[in-house]
Amino acid sequence: MRLDEIEVRRVTLPLCFPFETSFSRTTAKQFLLVSVSAGGVVGHAECVADVDPFYLPETNVTALHVLRDFLAPVAFSLEIESPREVLPAFARVRGHEMAKAALEMAVWELWARREGVPLWKLLGGRGGEIAAGVSVGLQPDEAALLDKVATEVEAGYRRVKVKIKPGRDVALVAAIRARFPTLPLMVDANSAYTLADAGHLARLDCFSLTMIEQPLGWDDIVDHAALQRRLSTPLCLDESIRSGDDARRALDAGACRVVNVKVGRVGGFSGAIAVHDVCRARGVPVWCGGMLESGIGRLANVHLQTLPGFTLPGDTSASARYFEEDLVDPPVVVSPAGAIAVPEGPGIGHAILWPRVERATDLHETWRRP
Ligand code: OSB
Ligand code: MG
């Protein structure tokens, strides 16, 4: 298969609520939507880069540049026999995993539509349903945080993650634990601490958290290993893992006991499968992270986490938590028991609402095979 055309749209959707982390506060989601076509069949994927380089180094501007000037020419030159060939073909371009992932995932989606199968079938997953968890941003105060957690627990979510940062950590966790003694609970620091905070972070050990996500440097493995030796709570790496090899090195070093898999952070589905396989071979659980995706990226995450190593609920929650009007029909919904149905239709399995996409698009580029 040869790609005929690649299209990129820049889409902006207002968020229902501001999302605050240790690194930023977001009120709208801006992302690149990548579409690839071959022989009249089209596949789509959402890029998880953001407007700023505060989570990881890529931005929507760097992703557009790298897609247009480096990845699209490579993709057009390929005679693709399997979507698994796409990520290795991009190896000359260093980093830029989010840009690579968007194009790679669009090829997988196209492939699934061509074969008339849901993405999960191509990825080696299963149908049925997945367990939904939720990521709660930093709130104005403790009362607001407790309210928010209560709302999510009542909605059925099977585990709750809360964002923390220095000054807004131990006391908040203690308050949540006092009110929800048995809730599967974890925290995510997005690299807001250093190894000098090890003693302070050890104060979280008494709250039976399922894990602490990415407390230290965004590209660190060594310090996390030193910290893990001082904590009984498992560490989970997010930002630091950008390939299957990163996962192997982190596990060899003892830097974590759980891994967050985000397709967009590891170069696409083949990178996600590589991380999954490394962890599964060692009995290390993985779960699927989120990047406030629209329904298009959200559904890709639903399909991914039907692979057998995804044994913990992830950050995939209902469309309605983020957007008044999602871009897919039906939107992603969560049952009162905290489950999301795995689509059975071809590709991502839900229809894309193109009039909504076009209304939210402020930039549109089309590249053709030379
Ligand atoms: O660290 O997991 C993270 C959102 C944006 C950037 C990084 C992260 C997050 C989340 C939200 O935690 C997950 C979601 O609800 O999509
Ligand atoms: Mg995280």
Image (cartoon, helix red, strand yellow):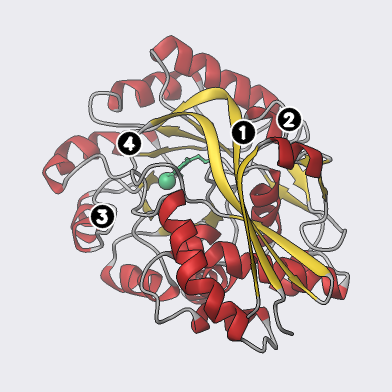
C-alpha separation, residue under disc 1 versus residue under disc 4? 20 Å
**142 lies above or below 65:** above
Labels 2 and 1 touching (C-beta < 8 A): yes
Kind of residue at disc 4: Phe
At 58% from the left and 27% from the top, the residue drawn is 15
Q: Circle 3 sits on which residue? A: 228
Secondary element under disc 2, as helix, strand or loop, is: loop
Q: Circle 2 sits on which residue? A: 325
Residue 284 in view here? no
C-alpha separation, residue under disc 3 versus residue under disc 4? 23 Å
Q: Circle 1 sits on which residue? A: 13
Kind of residue at disc 1: Leu
Label 3 vs 2, first from the N-terminus: 3
Disc 3 versus disc 1: nearer the observer: 1
Disc 3 versus disc 2: nearer the observer: 2
Residue extending furthest toward the left: 196
Disc 2 versus disc 4: nearer the observer: 2
Secondary element under disc 3, as helix, strand or loop, is: helix
Dot 4 alpha-carbon crowd within 10 angstroms: few under 14, some 14 to 19, many 20 or more: some
Residue 340 lies in quadrant? top right
Q: Circle 4 sits on which residue? A: 23
Q: Position of residue 144 (x, y in %)?
A: 47, 13
C-alpha separation, residue under disc 2 versus residue under disc 1? 8 Å
